[in-house]
């Protein structure tokens, strides 16, 4: 049985301008082994030689030692030569050098002026794109009344079915649940004052003026607005929109306007449907918890709601429909020509549509208050 080799060693000696380092023994990363340090500060040293002397088994510890010697030689402009050391040690040293390189220093945070400027530039670009699409839609309406628009009612009717009839279940469910929530929360507070019957007033006004159109619009922003953006984005990625332009067909007339008209016509009807389901939800809670008869609840609701309240909700719903269509079509036309771009466009369409709905609703609230509606 052979005797084990001595532990790793590295003996240094200087001969004129030559720095000789003899490495030998058993080099193991788990055992004791020399670590490279500056072996000489003599400026006369111009050459470095690493020479194997009784070298036994080795692993990455020897490669790290060779790597450190290379770094030292480069830093001191010393010529390095290797004798007797396996070639694979040098290859492993190169690999470790690539793996142990320090990552790039992260860039510092941008200053406030840069952030504000970039945000302003993006906002201005978004505003220009939105204004351009709105202008093209207005121009398309003018061509439609002159009989020159490439508008197909068949496509519009198909979109009306998709964004209207097909949306009835989800709009009805959400509106009914919103009516239940509002009636229950109102009942908890009003019962303390013996004003149970005023739950009908609260639910009726809130649903007809705000929650009915708002719930229908938010549902369609997530359902229909995203579908518009995905459809147009996919058509852009497949170069179908480019083909229409090549054939002289306006994408706004052929693709955008049927969708916007469908939403403009169907949103008021969905708002009425949402109003009815919301009031029914409030009626169910009032009858179950407050023991208010359905006839009394309905009579109280009719005394508080008039035509101005209904018309206010319908006006909002129509404008919300236009905004959802604009947001969905705008993001679809802006989509990148890739599958990831289509997904980002659908997400951006939902966010933009909901943002426009909330902003416009706040404007309507101030405007109707000034007009006394």
Image (cartoon, rainbow, N blue to C red):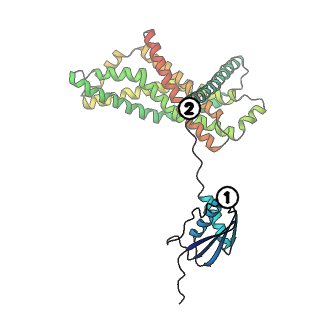
Q: Is residue 296 left or right of residue 30?
A: left
Q: Is residue 306 left or right of residue 101?
A: left
Residue of label 2: 111
Q: CA distance from mark 2 to mark 1?
A: 38 Å
Q: Would you place residue 101 above or below residue 248 in this image?
A: below
Asked whether disc 2 touches disc 1, contact meaning CB atoms under 8 Å apart, the reply is no
Percent x, y of residue 138: 65, 19
Q: Quadrant of residue 73?
A: bottom right
Q: Which residues are magenta?
A: 102-111
Q: Quadrant of the C terminus?
A: top left
Q: Who comes first in sequence, dot 2 or dot 1?
A: 1
Percent x, y of residue 219: 48, 33
Residue of label 1: 74
Q: Quadrant of residue 242?
A: top right
Q: Taking the image as drawn, is residue 292 in sight?
A: no
For the point 54% across and 69% down, which residue is it?
34
Q: Is residue 162 magenta?
A: no
Q: Would you place residue 141 above or below residue 247 in this image?
A: above
Q: Is residue 17 left or right of residue 299?
A: right
């Amino acid at each position: 049985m052979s005797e084990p080799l001595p532990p790793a060693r590295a003996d240094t000696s200087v001969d004129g301008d030559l720095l000789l380092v003899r490495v030998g023994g058993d080099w193991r990363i788990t055992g004791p082994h020399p670590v490279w340090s500056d072996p000489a500060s003599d400026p006369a040293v111009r050459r470095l030689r690493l020479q194997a002397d009784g070298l036994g088994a080795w692993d990455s510890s020897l490669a790290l030692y060779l790597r450190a010697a290379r770094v030292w030689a480069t830093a001191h402009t010393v010529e390095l030569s290797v004798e007797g050391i396996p070639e694979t040690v040098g290859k492993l040293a190169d690999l470790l050098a690539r793996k142990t390189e320090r990552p790039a220093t992260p860039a510092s945070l941008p200053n406030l002026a840069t952030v504000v400027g970039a945000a302003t530039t993006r906002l201005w670009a978004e505003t220009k794109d939105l204004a351009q699409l709105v202008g093209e839609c207005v121009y398309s309406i003018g061509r439609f009344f002159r009989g020159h628009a490439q508008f197909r009612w068949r496509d519009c009717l198909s979109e009306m079915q998709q964004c209207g009839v097909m949306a009835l279940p989800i709009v009805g469910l959400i509106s009914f649940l919103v009516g239940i929530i509002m009636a229950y929360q109102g009942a908890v507070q009003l019962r303390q004052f013996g004003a149970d019957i005023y739950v009908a007033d609260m639910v009726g006004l809130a649903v007809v003026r705000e929650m009915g159109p708002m719930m229908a619009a938010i549902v369609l922003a997530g359902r229909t607005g995203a579908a518009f953006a995905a459809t147009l984005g996919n058509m852009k990625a497949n170069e179908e929109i480019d083909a229409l332009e090549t054939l002289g067909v306006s994408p706004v007339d052929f693709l955008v306007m049927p969708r916007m008209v469908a939403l403009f016509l169907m949103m008021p009807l969905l708002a009425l449907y949402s109003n009815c389901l919301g009031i029914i939800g409030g009626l169910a809670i009032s009858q179950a918890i407050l023991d208010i008869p359905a006839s009394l609840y309905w009579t109280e609701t009719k005394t508080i709601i008039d035509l101005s309240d209904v018309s206010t909700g319908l006006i909002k719903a129509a404008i919300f429909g236009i905004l959802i269509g604009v947001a969905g079509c705008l993001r679809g036309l802006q989509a990148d020509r890739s599958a990831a771009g289509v997904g980002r466009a659908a997400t951006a369409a939902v966010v933009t549509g909901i943002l426009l709905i909330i902003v416009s609703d706040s404007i309507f609230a101030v405007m109707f208050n000034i007009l006394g509606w």
